[in-house]
Image (tube, helix red, strand yellow):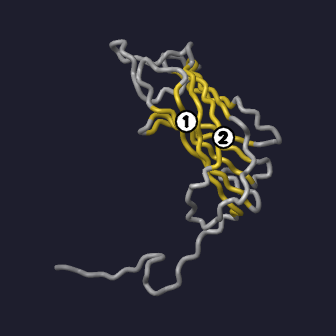
Amino acid sequence: MLTLTEACGVGGDDGGTPVPPLDNSEVCVAAFTVTGTFAVDPNTPLPTDKNGAPISGCWPVGTWSFTASLDPSATFDPSGAPKCTTAPTVLNSYSFKVTRTSDPMGGTDTIQTLTSTTTLGGGMQYHLSLSANGQGCEGSFEFGSADGTQYWNMKPTLPKLVPPAPSPTVISGGGDYVLYKANGWPWK
């Protein structure tokens, strides 16, 4: 026996009123391109497999240094926020350092630590993280104004390191900026 049912989807062309875009209190948005270098930490060599052969892939231990420039060709934005008409104030350069230290719980494991070496000043807050992706390692350096009205998210990408890893290695990537009407931090 076959039963047929009828359903309608949200926002579909069912003759109803279209769903308005979300208002995230965004005044404007901008996009950046990121370029820079990665210098491998000479005191923490690339890991090896059980046979002693170097392992390629995401190995972010070292110093990440990069600059960001406004990307006028970027397209926006499902929220409907317009492009910023003036370039948001950004620093001349950014950097952070990734280290590995012994696990305080013991054993042979190590812990990855990320430290910003960028002076943000003015009470700016930041979050820093790293993850492996299909291209290598991707950083996320999020920072913003003390009042939460300006938010930057820089995404430098380090390609997979193939031993012996050259140093410095080129970093590329992108980033975005949002100017909010009021405190719009994505985390509270």
Task: Choose top left, top right, bottom left or bottom right for residue 12.
Answer: bottom left
Q: Where does label 1 land, which residue? A: 130
| Farthest residue, direction bottom | 15
Tell me if 77 is positioned left or right of 186 in this view. Answer: left
Q: Report crowding for label 2: few under 14, some 14 to 19, many 20 or more residues within 10 A (C-alpha).
A: few
Instruction: Pick out the residue farthest to the front.
Output: 73
**Residue 88 at what x, y percent from top left?**
73, 51
Give the tally of numbered discs.
2
Q: Is residue 136 above or below residue 28?
A: above
Vertical relation: 23 (above or below) 86: below
The location of residue 43, given as percent across then percent down, is 56, 13
Q: Residue at x 70, y 41 (%)?
A: 126
Say above or below: 31 vs 53.
Answer: below
Q: Mark 1 and mark 2: span between their CA atoms?
A: 10 Å
Instruction: Pick the residue in front: 11 or 81.
Output: 81
Of the residues shown, which amino acid type is indicated by label 1?
A: Leu
Q: Choose top left, top right, bottom left or bottom right for residue 114.
A: top right
> What is the three-letter code of the residue carrying label 2?
His
From the top left corner, tell me how far across and down residue 37 is, in percent.
Answer: 58, 29
Direction from residue 89 to residue 42 in the image, left or right: left
Q: Which residue in the protein does label 2 denote?
A: 127
Residue at point 19%, 79% (across, down)? 2
